[in-house]
Amino acid sequence: MRKQGRIQYILMAPALLFCAVFVLWPIVDLLWLSVHKTDFIQTKFVGLGNYAKALESTQFWQAIGNSALYIVLITVGQVGLALIVALSVMNMKKRWIDFTRIASYLPALTAGVIIAMVWRWVFHYNGPANWLIGLFGAQPVQWFAGEFSIPIVSLIVIVSGFGGYLIMTLAAIQSINKDLFDAARIDGASELQIKLRIVLPILRPSIGMMVLLTAISAPQIIETVMMLAPYDHSASAAFAIYKEAFQNGRHGLAAAMAVITTIVLIGFTLVKGKVEKHGA
Amino acid sequence: MVRKVLVAAFCVLMLLPLWFLFTGSIQSIKGLMIMPAPIFPANPTLANYSWLVQIPELVRWVFNTGFITLSVVLGSTLVSAMAGYAFAFYNFKGKKLLWMLLMLGLMIPSISKIIPLFVITNQLGIAGTQLSAIMPLIFAPTLIFLARNYFETVPKSLLEAARIDGANDWQILFRIILPISQPIVGCIALFSAISALGDFVWQQLQLQDNQVATLLVGLMRMVQNKNADGMGINPIGKAMMVGVVLMVPLLIIFSVANKYFTNSLSGAMKE
């Protein structure tokens, strides 16, 4: 470590410059927009009017409610699936682990809009999903028209997003000292007991991290909603904001909605920090 | 044995959507409506692909995609590596504060940035150009974080030795640190390529003009607009073909960079 010299500032300069222009300036601008009514030709200061309007908007509340549902479904599904798969393959040969990792990660690699193309066919009125339920005698369903849309969008997000979490979980398992397992085996613990009583508790910090990451990203899902279910009854917070800004052209109102959403999401992070400090 | 079968079945299930994306792209609308969907289509057709190669802007879009992705990868890797190096190897005043400032970007949802960025690109005079698709992606806190964590594992004695041999800081970064940090540089490049190739929401807002569009934006725009010229009677098959085409660059990049992937991520999780 060296203290003298100015080179570190030169090294950081590009990052700081881009951070200032593409993070700090947008934050300031967002706050400014949120207290103005503007169509970019005429601009009027409206104080907290946009916030009041956002909180009165049934569409925004619906999106918040939808987001809560997305958070629950996607967090449980994504983190749960990553844990189940990781615990199932952890003792298998490296070849198997690698194959599972790649098979799970390939859908995650692909942008949401691309993968949505196949799901659009799967849940088409004449598509495989309706054929499958037809085998059990059920009538075909317009999947994205009603109450099925949120679970289905969640399912798609889980399938295409959990690969990254699987990689994290496997990495965390790899860093566990193997002597622990041997000691437990000598004491007569079964493989299942080792996984549930030793591995899971050790993974707790990683699980907490993954829950936070999914909980923050769930209200932000936008591409899948945009491509498959661009309706009020399935809108995430991000999609509702997008629609308000770029389809309805109410940038001030959308900015206020974005500020509220951002504060809630930052709140998650802070709450998690608190829980960790006071928790066992 | 039971477990092997289950794991294998699970992997197949995960890959099934991608496989159907491919088989769907070589089917007619009639073939797509055959249930149960055949694993190997009976009458494959290249009709969807021949529609693709007739798009007049196609070459333009491929070129634009390459240009934007390459610019983001180069810019982002360089910026992240430099900043990561500064934070891993130097002590200076305000280090903690500056680090928090850089990581602040992680807390802001991208939708919150999009609305003001729309205004800002206008004020910078780059709205609607390819620069507007490149610039916001150059700064990525996650990548700086990955770089710093990796560099911190490089033994300090190595640097001292190089310094005694008379190497200056820039030589140390570009001749020693970056070469021995290949896994993380590969990983950062992969991540920034993925972000550039998949940045749909922002790109479709900015790249309105067909001449500056990327493959992603240009093709998706045609797919979304069901009445567009030539979508014809098989919009589903064409949409799936577009999905296949858009996956190709990702698969190429992934197969090249895959080996860097796991190692560097496991490093990052130890934090």
Image: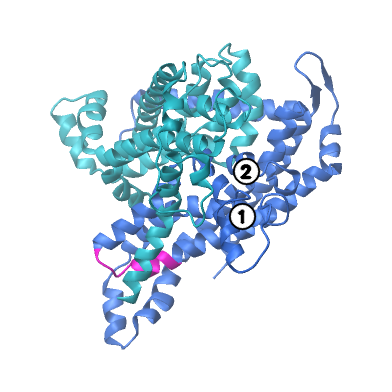
Q: Position of residue B82 (x, y in %)?
A: 35, 29
**In the image, which disc is placed on residue A47?**
none
Q: Are marks 1 and 2 in contact (CB under 8 Å)?
A: yes
Amino acid identity at mark 2 = Leu
Mark 1, chain letter? A
Mark 2, chain letter? A
Q: In the displayed structure, does residue B116 sit left or right of residue A110?
A: right
At x 34%, y 73%, the residue is B3
Q: Quadrant of the N terminus of chain B?
A: bottom left
Classify B143 as above or below A195.
above
Question: For mark 1, what is the residue?
Answer: A152
Task: Count the labels in the image.
Answer: 2
Residue at the bottom extreme of this rendering: A188
- Whether residue A90 is in magenta: the answer is yes
At x 57%, y 33%, the residue is B233
- Whether residue B23 is in magenta: the answer is no
Q: Nearer the viewer, residue B64 or A63?
A: B64
Which region of the structure is painted magenta?
Answer: A84-93
Q: Which chain is blue?
A: A
Q: Which chain is cyan?
A: B
Q: Position of residue B37 (x, y in %)?
A: 47, 54
Classify A17 as above or below B27.
above
For mark 2, give the secondary structure.
helix
